[in-house]
Amino acid sequence: MSIRSETMEQFATLSDAFSLLIKTLGRLPKRECWRWHEIFQSTVQMGVDSLPIITVSTAVAGTVVTHEIAWHMQAALHSVSMIPGFSGQFIFRELGIAIPALLLVAKVGAATTAEVGTMKITEQIDALKLLGIDPLSYLVFPRFIGAILSSACLTLISLSVTMGCSIAVAVCSYNFSTLEFINALRHFIGFKDVLCALVKGIIYGAVIPIVSCAYGFRCQGGAEGVGTATTNSVVTATITIISLDFFLTYLFTLFL
Amino acid sequence: MKISNEAKVGSLIILTIGLAFAFSWVIGIQNPFNQSTSFYVTYNFAGGIEVGSPVRVSGIKVGKVERIEFFSPITSKKVALKEPGSAPSDEGTAVYPLKVKISVHKDATFGVRQDSRFYINLAGIIGERYVEITPGHIHAPQLKEGDVVAGVDPPRIDQLISQSFDLAGKVKEIIDENKGDITRSIDLLYKLSGNLNKTLGWVDKSALFKTDLSRLIENLISITSDIRKVSNQVQTPEGDKTLKLLYQLLWRLEPLDSKTIRSFLQKEGVKVQLF
């Protein structure tokens, strides 16, 4: 496949993803679309089952980041008194939000694309249509709601785990007390930071199932096609999240 | 035991809500145990104070800046827009463009009174700003919820730099205008210090000064010790009494002159050829 046709294919998929988002949002007020069993199932798959990997990853990230910040502060300022402020802002603005989102893309996004793609190439989606079931309401909407719910919860959990590890490092290695750390943190972190983190988490959670399902719905060509669609889905969702992170951060600095 | 999806999702949501409350407490959005009083402090120049900046009473953090807004003078009776300690004026009010809402913990509000002063200070290595409240006088009324008081504007570094730049310019002008005089004065000072140095060296080497000077110092020491003894004796009750008597005697003798003494002696019939 030439670069031109591949680029066109990517743009077509992104366009599909956008129309899928609009259609999914259009189903929000429809009561029959709220299939609670499927929504809970998606939430468990995306949220509860992702808890261990997200907890471990963010804990390690928090530890490393605090050590790094302390090292740089010691080198540049010969003082580590600002660890709470710097690490807190970095965790609340980027680290504690981006890491769970990217992990969700890798774990949940890939699984969703593979599942929907397999259903597409085995004509299960056509079967659903024949049975009079709207594939969007049955496959996409529960995942969309589940991903938003899971992402919001996981963002808060990852923030607390990362901050907890940061506090632990500051207390164990840099002679801070927990209260001292929290007091210093209060000067730098406010309501708007938590709000921004939650909004970002919700938006990233909405992006993942939409991009994954769009790639799944366009899947063709057997097992190889499923593999390609999964790879492309993960790459696109990752780039989308990183780009959105830039735009959202810029917007929040403008309005909050 | 198999846990249902509903239970898992419920647990996840409960955990998240709990964490949200914990966060709100940690970052000071919501504290169920917090009881604070809010009032307004007005400034002409806020000097970089921000929402969330700490408020301290006697150096202890007791609150934070809740809100900063531009302000038009209000006519409420609660307003005391005169900086504590400033000169009295007929109006007693002034236009302060900034109004800073601060919250202070209830335990610390006892010391925050109408004559308390509200400074904007710098702290920390990155220069974070905070509001420092000095406790007021016990007789001054205590500030209540919603009261408005005038704060002490922080010094403006930009103005100081500008003024010092002007001062440096003027000093340079004076130096340029009196260059000859200043050079001459420096030369004279140089010569003077040289002469003084020579004189001191001569004094140091002179045998005469060594002997006479030491004798002079010994005498001075003995004189001062004598004076100390005398003054010690005078400071006794007897000495005090003697001094009082002497004072009374002098007071009585003051109006006496030759005429008075002569008339006294004539009255007494003393016939002497003294006068």
Image (cartoon, grey):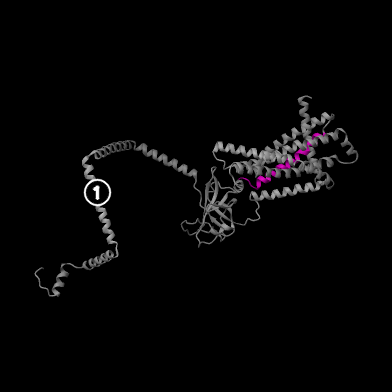
* Camera-nearest residue between B91 and B226: B226
B185 horizontally vs B73: left or right: left
Q: Is residue B76 left or right of residue B260?
A: right
**Which chain is mark 1 on?**
B
Label 1 Cα neighbours within 10 Å, binned few <14 / some 14-19 / many ≥20: few
User: Which image quarter is the C terminus of chain B in?
Assistant: bottom left
Residue A65 in the image, given as x and y percentages of width and height: 64, 38
Magenta residue span? A188-217
User: Residue visible at 21% across and 67% down?
Assistant: B253
Measured from the top left, where is residue B255 in percent x and y?
21, 68
Residue under pointer 1: B218
**Residue at 49%, 47% in the rendered image:** B155
Please tell me whether residue A56 is drawn above or below residue B146 in the rendered image: above
Extreme residue in the right direction: A131
**B160 left or right of A161 in image:** left
Residue B97 picture location, percent across and down: 55, 51
Determine the secondary structure under disc 1.
helix
- Can residue A53 be seen? yes
Query: Where residue B222 sits: x, y (%)?
Result: 24, 52
